[in-house]
Structures are given as C-alpha cells and as structure tokens.
Image (cartoon, helix red, strand yellow):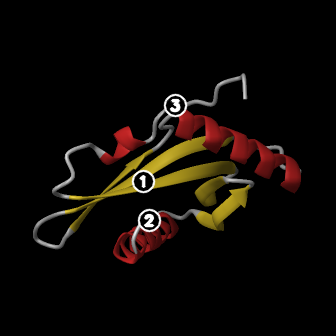
Amino acid sequence: MNNKQNDFGRHCEFMARTYLEQQGYLILETNWRSGHREIDIIAKDGETLVVVEVKARKNEDFANAEDAVGEKKMRNLIRAAHNYIMIKELDCETRFDIVTLILGNNGEYELNHIKDAFLPIVNI
C-alpha cells in the first residue's frame, strides 16, 4: 500500500472514530494489534464492547466497501477480539460493526454504519 493509500485509510479511520464519538461511543483503542491481526477501533456503546472494522473506498472502486470484509477477515477480527477480551478480563456483550466510507467524485464522503454486521462463530 502506498503513502497516498495509507493517508486515505488513516483519514477515513479518523472520520469513523469522530462519527462514533458523536454517536456517544467511548473509544477504547484504535489500531489495536494481536499478533498479525488488527482491530481498527474498539469502543463501548453503553455496556456493549464494539469491535469496528473501517472500510474505505473511492468512488471509482467497483466493489462495495462492506463486501471487503470476507470470512477470513471476520475470523481474524473475532480472534483478535477474543484476545482483547481475555487480556482486559472483560465480561460484557460484544458486537461487530463495520463503518464504510465512500469518497464521491464531489469530494464528499458517504458514511454508513452497519451495526451487528456479523455474528461471531463459535469455532475460533
């Protein structure tokens, strides 16, 4: 990934974080790593722990941003979240959300927050 893509991704993660804070979420971690797995944002929505994957696309990209979260990515997010919960010794409901940002031709961003985007599988 080149610097321009990195900057775009970081900017979109900042926008997602700002949006979530405006919605009343408490941001606990950003870019939290467990080995080679990374969680973009870990937040609290009330008493619920929310694991957030941020996906960004430029308008000319054909695939939907949320479609970029495939089975392997879901598995990695679930495993990383499990490690986070164990390390922090948490006992709370956990939800997996996706925040997508699409950059339009006019320079405006379209943000979509998909709550409960997927359910964790038992076999992690």
Q: Is residue 60 above or below residue 6?
A: above
Look at the image and tell me in which quarter the N terminus lies: bottom left
- Viewed as shown, does residue 43 lie left or right of 65? right
Q: Of the residues under marks 2 and 3, which one precedes in the sequence? A: 2
**Which residue corresponds to the image point at 87% horizontal and 53% vertical from the top-left?**
87
- Mark 1 and 2 residues: CB-CB less than 8 Å, in contact? yes
Alpha carbon distance from label 2 to label 3: 22 Å
**Which residue corresponds to the image point at 51% horizontal and 52% vertical from the top-left?**
53
- Viewed as shown, does residue 56 lie left or right of 92? left
Local secondary structure at mark 3: helix
Alpha carbon distance from label 1 to label 2: 7 Å
In the image, which disc is placed on residue 16?
2
Q: Position of residue 104 (x, y in %)?
A: 16, 63
Residue linked to disc 1: 99
Local secondary structure at mark 2: helix
Residue linked to disc 3: 71
In the image, which disc is placed on residue 107?
none
Q: Position of residue 24 (x, y in %)?
A: 53, 64
Residue type at numbered disc 1: Val
Look at the image and tell me in which quarter the C terminus lies: top right
Residue type at numbered disc 3: Glu
Alpha carbon distance from label 3 to label 1: 17 Å
Local secondary structure at mark 1: strand
Circle 2 or circle 3, nearest the eye? 3
| Number of residues whose C-alpha sits closer than 10 Å to that of mark 1, classed few (under 14), some (14–19) or many (20 or more) | many
Residue type at numbered disc 2: Ala
